[in-house]
Amino acid sequence: MLVAVDAGHGWAEGRGDPGAVGASGLMEADVTLIAALAMADHLLELGHEVVLTRSSRAFVSLQERTAIANAAKAQAFVSIHCNAAASPTAHGSETLYYPTSPSGQALAKRLQWALVEAGGRRDRGIKPRSDLHVLRATIMPAALVELAFITNPEEERLLSSEQWISEVARALAEAV
C-alpha cells in the first residue's frame, strides 16, 4: 500500500508556519517532522511504500501537500499535528476526518485507537472536520492526528521525547 505521510506545518530560516509552540519553545513543525519520518520508517519496515509531503523543515503549502498525495495515487493520507489550547490543562489525543468520507472515518478510528493505546493519553475521540484542506482535497481516505497538546506542560515533555514519538509513530504505521 502507498501511504502519504504529512508532517504538519513547516518552518525554516524564520519562514513558513511553525504551528503551535509550547512553553519551552518546542515547535509543532519540528515535532510533526520527527513523527512523520519515524512513521515513514515504520511503514517501510512493514512493507508499505511511502510518499512524504515534506522531509525537511521547509514549508509546503496545503495545496502542494494534497497535490503530492493525489499525484502519487496514495491509498491513504495521514497528516500529523500537535493540538493547542488557551488552557494549559487541555490534554489528550484526537483524530479528524472529512465528514462525508466513510473510509476516512474508518481510517481515523484505527489511527485514534492506536494513538491512544501507544501514547497513553486521554481519548478525545474522532471528529468530523469539513474545513481542513488536507482532508477535503485528498482523493484517498485521509485523517489528521493530533498527537497531544503542545500547550500542556506534561504533554509537551512527551512530544519532545523521541522515544515516545517513535512508539506512537510505530502504532500509527501499524494502524494504517
Image (cartoon, rainbow, N blue to C red):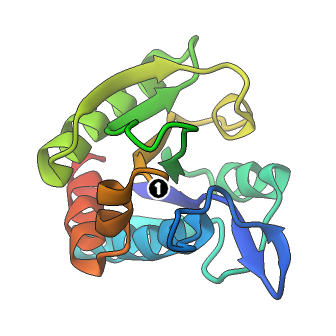
Residue in view at x 44 percent, y 44 percent: 88
Q: Is residue 47 left or right of residue 23?
A: left
Q: Among all residues in the image, which is located at the extreme top? A: 100
Determine whether 9 is above or below 115 in the image: below
Determine whether 106 is above or below 13 in the image: above
Determine whether 146 is above or below 97 in the image: below
Q: Is residue 136 left or right of residue 127?
A: right
Q: Among all residues in the image, which is located at the extreme bottom? A: 13
Q: Viewer-proximal residue, 64 or 11?
A: 11
**Circle 1 sits in a helix, a strand or a loop, which is it?**
loop
Q: Is residue 81 visible?
A: yes
Residue 100 lies, in percent from the top left, at 58, 11
The answer to which quarter of the image holds residue 45 is bottom left
Q: Is residue 121 left or right of residue 49?
A: left
Mark 1 neighbour class, 10 Å CA radius: few under 14, some 14 to 19, many 20 or more? many
- Quadrant of the drawing holding the N terminus: bottom left
Residue in view at x 60 percent, y 62 percent: 21
Residue 77 lies, in percent from the top left, at 52, 47
Residue 82 lies, in percent from the top left, at 49, 52
Residue of label 1: 150
The answer to which quarter of the image holds residue 47 is bottom left
Q: Viewer-proximal residue, 91 or 10?
A: 91
Residue in view at x 63 percent, y 33 percent: 135
Determine whether 121 is above or below 165 in the image: above
Q: Amino acid at mark 1?
A: Ile
Q: Is residue 80 visible?
A: no
